[in-house]
Image: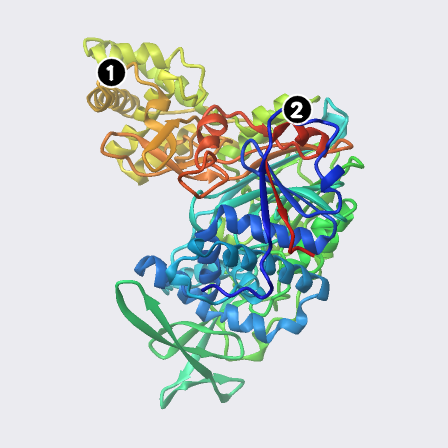
Amino acid sequence: MFRAHTIFSIMIVTLVAASANAADLPGTGADAGKTVVYRDTWGVPHIYAPTVEAGFYAMGWAQAEDRPHELLKNLMRGMGESARVDGPGAVETDQVARLWDLYEGSKRLADRIRPEVLSHLQAFVRGANAFYAAHPNDVPAWWGNRPVDEFMIVAFSRLFLQSWSFDDGFDDLKRGGIEPGVERVPRGSNQFAIAPSRSAVNAAILCIDPHLGWLGASRFWEFRIHASELQGSGFTLAGVPYIGLGHNENVAWAMTTGGPDTADVYELTVNPDDPSQYLYDGQWRQMTSRETTIEIKGEKPVTLRIWESHHGPVAARKGSKAYVVKSAYADAVQGNEAWYEFNFAKDYRGIIAGLATLQVFPQNTMVADTSGNIYYQRTGRVPRRPSGYDWSRPVDGSTSATEWQGFHPATDHLQVLNPPQGYMQNCNIPPDAMMVNSPFSVDKTLPYIFADLSHSPQRDGWTNQRGARAVELLDKDASVTIKEAKAYATDRHPYGVERWLGVLKDAHARFGVALQSDRNYADGIKDILRWDENLDPDSTGALKYYYWRKQIVDDLGDDAASKLAKKIDYLLAALGKPAPPIQLTDEEQRGILKSFAVGMGKLKADLGSLDKTYGDVFRVGRDDKSWPLGGGGDGNKGLTTFRNVGYGKERPDHTRWGQGGQTSTEIVVLTKPIKSWTYVPLGQSDRPESAHYTDQAENAFSPAQMKPTWWTPKELAKHIESRTTLEGAR
């Protein structure tokens, strides 16, 4: 039987009619002073508690209720035990967790964790344990009877957050010609901030839009909380307390992938007579080692011997050389301290205080507050590196001349408060592309602070479709309404599509006569040239555009298709740089038309009709149910939109279902009180029998309609579906 640390809570569940008496606001009347989890009509928990600790207890309970297995799986990921449940595909994750000894290391370094934060983690753990003790059938056999502990929380937090830095180190290995055997996890995000001067409501507006996988470790969990000083709304991961992305009463914060360089690779010369020794300043130094065994479902266990130098763990060997990935976060166990500062911040300066801990992973952090400020910092734990070395690939680790010289303080990071443009965005692009006339330039700072090379072969001078579209929308809108902000977050226009349609139109005018006898070509060209250029689910033109661009890649191959795209695309036009003319050869124009004709034939063959819509192919769903979806994310086909969706491979019925992209989108308007809207791609619950298993997929995400958060008691009162009193919280 699952053992809890404390006596488990008594749970009282009451179904509440939608027409609840507004006079009995949540947290008042008979519920005053109690710890109550109200669930709204989307199944989202609203926690009301008399103390902060009781709020975290309820958070642990509610997370376990919604994600009983995924919460425990995440903890096993942090401990390096997930292959025991998920099989061989999880071995890489376990190897990374064991390489940096995340769980045992967290226990060894526990005295570094701030007492208030440790208290919050322990309260969260008590709540999760209480739920599992009260619901033993929700405890999977693979977990056993061990209780959740606070160091499991720390270890998973480290695995998720610090993996950005670990992957950057593995990329340095690859640039040095060494294969680390670890695949980079696809990551991306959008964000934008609008100042009151450009807001129709005279308040700052923030878009929070992380793009990650829809299932597994990155599946976000939504909640609201009103627990003494902790008042807020947003998302976190199953197995992690605190509002990860969202807002409190005063301030909202967003993050996107991209940042400074926080990891390096050291090349060590190994003693040919003793491979456990390496050369350092002319002498042989001894490595330490530890042995660890990874259990794998369906296969024999694998035992690893991990060697460590003073630089860090050996990630690869080649000949007489050993390669160490040195991450700035190797001993960073205080990550939750940054989010403690965020959650209790009074304005943007509280976010700065969190970033000053140097515990936040390499990210673009964007902030807005109720005082009207918008703020940006490109943050991370950045080593001070000796000059004269190429830190983007392995450097000589045999000399003290290459040793890091501490860390840059957060004041060294790129940052701006209230830019005169009145807006900013970062959709995984370099700082110089954040807005027209960006204040950032790589020559004004150290290159490794400006940008890490893991996201692009060059640090500046480029943008992507999402970033270009964001600037295009924001720069021309001097008075952004709430409706417009939500529309921008769900925008389905692929930047630059008009240049491609212009090329198609010109080629058709010159060479299309020869293809007019092909009925699929004739009908298809007529439809696509009157298309409104948006990847909407009900659009026939959007589907034809997809089939055309896909066929170009199929006909030419990735490299040649990329060269053609470089002749047509010019994303920097969004930043005010004049676009060069498109100059294609006759052969290229004929090839474009041929690809269009073949693509239309395939569309007809696949789906039986040229009248099929984009949403007939592109879907959001779970298990055996799906719904039409708009927006795109196929970068090599020019189909990426601000509303980013990563679609899986084509199914036997020729549909493609979303599997990543927008995972927890929020629009926050920093009025007093704050107003916010959200949606997720699936639903709140992981329980198939729940009404909230796929309700947002069908009724919010598919139609691109963000739902109100009903964050204040008055807003929530008429939308309560159930209430749960937790008697054991304190």
Going 66% across and 24% down the picture, which residue do you hit?
482
Residue 370 visible in the shown view: yes
Q: How is the image coloured?
A: rainbow
Q: In this view of the protein, which residue sits in the foreground, 442 or 71?
A: 71
Q: Nearer the viewer, residue 63 or 416?
A: 63
Q: Secondary structure at mark 1?
A: loop
| Quadrant of the drawing holding the N terminus | bottom left
Q: Which mark is residue 511?
A: none
Tell me if I can see residue 374 in this picture: no
The amino acid type found where label 1 is placed reads: Ser
Numbered marks: total: 2
Query: How far from the left and from the top, in percent, is residue 57?
Result: 63, 54
Tag 2: amino acid: Ile
User: Residue 689, position in %: x, y?
Assistant: 41, 38
Counting residues from the N terminus, which is met first, the one under dot 1 or under dot 2?
A: 2
Out of 363 and 614, give the one closest to the viewer: 614
Image position, residue 396 (x, y; %):
49, 74
In the picture provided, is 487 more to the left or to the right than 713? left
Query: Residue at label 2?
Result: 482
- Which residue is found at the position 70% from the left and 21% from the top? 479
Circle 1 residue: 609
Indicate whether 330 appears above or below 364. below
Distance between the alpha carbons at the discs numbered 1 and 2: 39 Å
Figure quadrant of residue 384: bottom right
Residue density around tag 2, few if under 14, some if 14–19, many if 20 or more, within 10 Å: some
Residue 288 vs 61, above or below: the answer is: below
Residue reaching furthest right?
371
| Side of 430 where 547 appears, left or right | left
User: Is 73 drawn above or below residue 25 in the view shown?
Assistant: below
Secondary element type, mark 2: helix
